Image (spheres, rainbow, N blue to C red):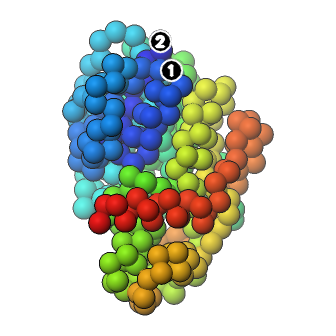
Amino acid sequence: MKTAVVTGGSGFLGSHLCDKLLSEGLKVICIDNLITGNVDNISHLAGNENFAFIKHDITNYIFIPGKVDYILHFASPASPVDYLQLPIQTLKVGSLGTHKALGLAKEKKARILLASTSEVYGDPEIHPQPEEYWGNVNPIGPRGVYDEAKRFAEAITMAYQRYHNVETRIARIFNTFGPRMRAKDGRAIPNFIMQALTGQPITVYGDGSQTRSFCYITDQVDGLFKLLMSEEDEPVNIGNPEEIPLIEIAKEIIELTNSKSKIIFEELPVNDPKVRQPDITKARTKLGWEPKVNRLEGLKKTIQYFKELI
């Protein structure tokens, strides 16, 4: 059996990746310091002889005995609430943590997949965003701690590929949703669902005309796995190209939950992107991947998960 190490493996994306890798016949070592992860996300794997959990801060040296074939580097605070509260930790895991993960890949001669983000495009001046676009990021703004951490992570990953011949893959992940998101995640869909289910006002920032493109978790994980197993060694957008204004998502969630919540508007956060839509031509042609789950179908499953949380 081949072995995969997943950093940030008890988080939303990481835990679903652990499930996927195990289902594909791999042994999985999950590493997480639980700063934003949650062991409940991997509790169903307790007792699985092909799964191991290590509590560790990957900004420190990573020691894994034995053979490692794949490393999936997903450790990082990933929502605005998290990286605004944890700015130094976000920068450290994007820089020092990525350096340590790449060092492990070099030592083990393993292939490494970096979880990058659509945030490397910043508030884009090109729409939709292709991988060739260099982005429009404010490095000293409050969001810069996440955006620049991921941009640095991409740069050092490509340096390890070119200088040390490490096999690298880079996924630029667009907005993803589904079960195991945290109730107080701070992102639009969990916020809207929790507010709708508890009868609170639905908080929309700005006028709600800013757009996002939401990919359901099973589609995202499928795309990430295909990228990991592909020969594509430059960044690939993984996301759903169906673009929707946030005000429309809020209305859909109110309808799906039969909520009486009213929409209220608050000030738009600093440097909040006005548009976000992936060009997935590369994923379609190089990976044979595109999303399959309808947004409303995904929202229904996600709402059911949050109902059970409450």
Q: Residue at x 46, y 27 (%)?
A: 22
Question: In the structure shown, which secondary structural element does the residue marked by tag 1 occupy?
Answer: loop
Q: Position of residue 269 (x, y in %)?
A: 40, 76
| As drawn, 42 above or below 4 | below
The image quarter containing residue 68 is top left
Q: Position of residue 119 (x, y in %)?
A: 50, 57
Q: Nearer the viewer, residue 171 or 187?
A: 187
Mark 1 burial class by Cα count in 10 Å: few <14, some 14-19, many 20+: few
Q: Amino acid under label 2?
A: Met
The residue that mark 1 highlights is: 25
Question: Which is nearer the eye, 125 or 213?
Answer: 213
In the displayed image of the protein, which residue is found farthest to the top?
A: 66
181 to 111, vertically: above or below: below
Q: Nearer the viewer, residue 13 or 195?
A: 195
The residue beneath circle 2 is: 1
Q: CA distance from mark 2 to mark 1?
A: 7 Å
**Are circles 2 and 1 on residues that touch, CB within 8 Å?**
yes
Sequence-wise first label, 2 or 1: 2
